[in-house]
Image (tube, rainbow, N blue to C red):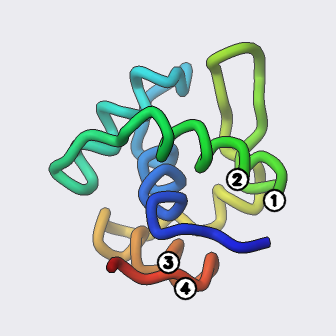
Amino acid sequence: MAFEWSDAWVLTAAVYAGEPKTRAALVAAGDYVNHAILTKAELDGGLRRLVAAGYLERVRRGVYALAPAGTVLAGRSVHKTLARVEAELGVSPA
């Protein structure tokens, strides 16, 4: 599966988003991670690809959870987590 760098941003945001991991919580955590706001296209595409690849699970409409494959990528800091996620997905910032 081909990932985009914004997918790494979404997955890292999911690590730091509170529970439940709603779309709003993911956007807020994404701002914390990257000091920018995910676009609707980045969020929708990232959620679709990350669920399909088994990193996230859809709990119900608009609510997500980390799957085991996503949970193991959490690092001791945002920077380390993002670096692990980028390596796992094979992406780097543009």
Above or below 49: residue 47: above
**Residue 87's image quarter?**
bottom right
In the image, residue 90 lies at what x, y percent?
59, 85
Q: Residue furthest left?
A: 35
Q: Look at the numbered disc 2 and give the secondary structure of its residue.
A: helix
- In the rendered structure, which disc, 1 or 3, sits on the residue that comes first in sequence? 1
- In the rendered structure, which disc, 1 or 4, sits on the residue that comes first in sequence? 1
| Whether label 4 touches label 3, CB < 8 Å | yes
| Badge 2 amino acid | Leu
- How far is the residue under mark 1 from the one under mark 3? 14 Å
Foreground pick, 56 / 38: 38
- In the rendered structure, which disc, 2 or 3, sits on the residue that comes first in sequence? 2
Q: In this view, does 60 lie to the left or right of 75?
A: right
In the image, residue 92 lies at what x, y percent?
42, 83
| Whether label 1 touches label 3, CB < 8 Å | no
Q: Look at the numbered disc 4 and give the secondary structure of its residue.
A: helix
**Residue pointed to by mark 1:** 53
Question: What number is the disc on residue 86?
Answer: 3
Q: Look at the numbered disc 1 and give the secondary structure of its residue.
A: loop
| Whether label 1 touches label 2, CB < 8 Å | yes
